[in-house]
Image: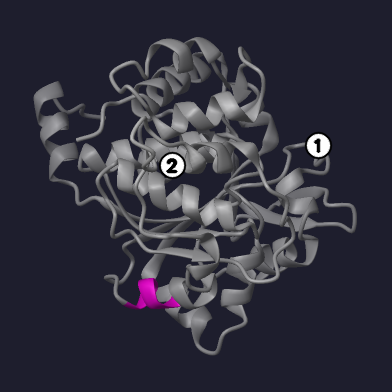
Amino acid sequence: MRLLPLALWAVSLAAAPPVALIFDTDMGNDIDDALALAVIHSLESRGEAKLIGVTLTKDNPWAAVYVDLVNHFYRRPDVPVGMVKAGKTPETSAFTRVPAERRGSDGKLLYPRRLGEGMTAPEAVGLLRGVLEKQADGSVAVVQVGFSTNLARLLDEPGAKELIRRKVKLLSMMAGHFPDGRPEYNVKVDIPAARKVLADWPTPVVLSGWEVGAAIEYPAASIENDFRHEDNHPVADGYRAYKKMPYDRPTWDLTSVLYAVRPGRGYFSLSEPGTVTVDDQGKTRFESDPGGRHRYLIVDAVQRARVLEALIQLATQPRR
């Protein structure tokens, strides 16, 4: 196999169009969602991605407010934000609420946003459909790092499956546990929705199982040291509010983002093709099948070091 010289390889990366990303998240349940959103914005600043919409499976108004203020912080205030209706986890989270309520010495909100309160955000499924309809065929990567509620409801819409088939090239999911299939949170919270998405989603699906993010922990030292280029940062604020510092946290959702945008960089290996099913306890089972649409990520010790380095650089990159 011929290898491109480094300069030509860099040019080829720069020439590639940015990946159109939809980020479907349960922002508020775990802090890795916030770090994943920071990674997306940094990838967009590098010209590798374009965030075209964020939809929430967390049914709490602070979730939408927090996403909106983070988008504003990264100078992308027009990114549409949609919210699930009658979702599964309405509980309030400190890491979304505390940054949203912070005020400066002048009494004004520290982090501006468009959404005054989350219930004014549009409904997620309608937003997903509207965003997809505007994209070029085969251009969109959907990153689902929460429950499957929104995507399952989208599949129930008339004509939506064909729309997805035309517009979406990849669904990158943080879900499941491989290869042993232990129950995993994102699956357990809405088992019927996870079953539906895995059974009916018409494009390739790559799953980052619990074991991948658990093997690569985001260091508290980075939160304390690498965000100092800003006097105030909503992602670092959220991390500090989530749990008592210092603590390291698995990079579950960040891995799904990284794969969706940089699938060919060798950060991860892939399982053989197959089919993933879900049982009544939320356990995922993978069966090898050459014609299957599903694969899952595998990471070794060398890859873990590379992934962590990339994620720290991206999550802490100064905004542009």
Quick check: can you spot residue 270?
no
Classify 10 Å Cα crowding around label 2: few (below 14), some (14-19), many (20 and above): many
| Residue at disc 1, secondary structure | loop
Q: Against 10, is 28 above or below?
A: below
Residue 181 appears left or right of 145: right
Dividing the picture into quadrants, the one containing residue 108 is: top left
Upstream in sequence: badge 2 or badge 1: 2
Q: Nearer the viewer, mark 2 or mark 1?
A: 2
Q: Which residue is mark 2?
A: 37
- In reply to whether residue 130 is colored magenta, the answer given is yes
Q: Main secondary structure of the magenta part?
A: helix
Region in magenta: 129-133
Looking at the image, the residue that sits furthest to the bottom is 158
Quick check: can you spot residue 19?
yes
Where in the figure is residue 86, as x and y percent of width and height? Answer: 70, 70
The residue at the point 39 percent across, 35 percent down is: 39
Q: Which mark is residue 280?
A: none
Q: Which residue is mark 1?
A: 180
The residue at the point 66 percent across, 62 percent down is: 198
The residue at the point 42 percent across, 26 percent down is: 311
The image quadrant where one finds the N terminus is top left
Q: In this orientation, which residue lies closer to the viewer: 308 or 223?
A: 223
